[in-house]
Amino acid sequence: MTVNILTLGCSKNLVDSEHLLAQFRVSGYKVLHNAYDTTAEIVIINTCGFILDAKEESVHTILSYIEEKQRGNIQKLFVMGCLSERYREELTEEMPEVDGFYGVWEMPAILEAMGSRLDQRLLHERELTTPSHYAYLKISEGCNRTCAFCAIPGIRGAQRSISIKELLKESNSLVSKGVKELILIAQDLTNYGIDLYGNRALPELLKELVKIKELEWIRLHYAYPTGFPEEVIDLMASEEKICNYMDIPIQHVNNDILSAMGRGHNREKIESLLQKFRKQIPDVALRTTVLTGFPGETEKAFSELLDFVGAFRFERLGVFPYSHEDDTPAFKNFQDMIPDQLKSERAGAIMELQQEISLRLNEDKVGKSFKVLIDRREEG
């Protein structure tokens, strides 16, 4: 029989799907990933439940496959991941056609529902869905932060770091399959290891990963600004294998908004950390994420954010209009007073500015040579 897993949301979900695909393959199933135009007897949808747009996409996908099941095109439909974890009771009641809803920690239960069981020998194995030369390495689950806008701690729980020993096993397995670049991901790279070792152990993990002979690049995603272990900056400057790239979401720079968000730092601390990266690694590429329309964001506060983006010139930037999510501190403590249209207009203004910045930074690369990895060919 064929199992088709559809992965929605972030790269952390993708890693979960890859582990599940490996388990199904060893059980004798033919496995597919995101094969929307292929008929499979069994479909598993790995959902996102982070913000409104993601929830709507997940629900729309489930409904479309309920229709496929009703037409007789699939036999079994299962739903897993963050949306299931967050709204299982409501989903079970509203979508009885789904054969089972499973949360973020229930891989063994999904396998049992299919007449199989978890093979402990394969806990480090994954069926890669990325191009063969790179893979995501999830180094921890959950989060101990209390950002007012974020539902993740309520969905994925407190931080649970994976030991360096286990991560090295998984990394060596990936490299043996031809992976040249590992992209380290977590809800919060900054706090990695604090629950296991009593200290922020990201530097220690990086020192071990760079020893893997066939591994060429290590890239860091999702590092929280507060408490960032600055030894990582020194390692990035000295170790060729660690890419001069850092994904560090700032969300805002206005101190009143940062305080209301519960971010645990102010503008001065953010700027100090970012400038250390720029000073010690002159060619570093910094990516960030910002949030517009958080409750209380005045025109003045938004202008401060826009001016900062224009002055600092991030190499990459993403922006999200604020989503008023239930079960978050902001939902309980603030009213969502800013109209959605104004949130979107503010987000659009930042992206328009960032497109200009990105163009100028890209133009500066013309005439220079870079070592690259080719993901795919398109039209020759």
Image (spheres, rainbow, N blue to C red):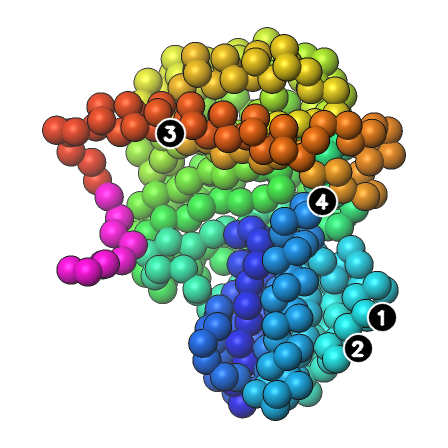
Q: Nearer the viewer, residue 171 or 341?
A: 341
The span from disc 3 to disc 1 (Cα, nearest Å) is 44 Å
Q: In this figure, which residue is indicated by the disc labeled 4?
A: 152
Task: Report helix, strand or loop for mark 4.
Answer: helix
Residue 132, position as x, y percentages in the image? 34, 61
Instruction: Work out whether 253 lies above or below 334.
Output: above
Of mark 3 and mark 4, the one earlier in the sequence is: 4
Outermost residue on the left side: it is 367
The mark found on residue 355 in the picture is: 3
The image quadrant where one finds the C terminus is: bottom left
Amino acid carrying label 2: it is Pro
Q: Nearer the viewer, residue 283 or 140?
A: 283
Q: Which residues are magenta?
A: 372-380
Q: In this figure, which residue is indicated by the disc labeled 1?
A: 93
The span from disc 1 to disc 4 (Cα, nearest Å) is 23 Å
- Residue 170 visible in rendering: yes
Of mark 1 and mark 4, the one earlier in the sequence is: 1
Of mark 4 and mark 2, the one earlier in the sequence is: 2
The span from disc 4 to disc 2 (Cα, nearest Å) is 26 Å
Circles 4 and 2: CB atoms closer than 8 Å = no
The span from disc 3 to disc 4 (Cα, nearest Å) is 29 Å
Amino acid carrying label 4: it is Ile
Amino acid carrying label 3: it is Gln
Q: Relative to residue 109, is residue 31 drawn left or right?
A: left
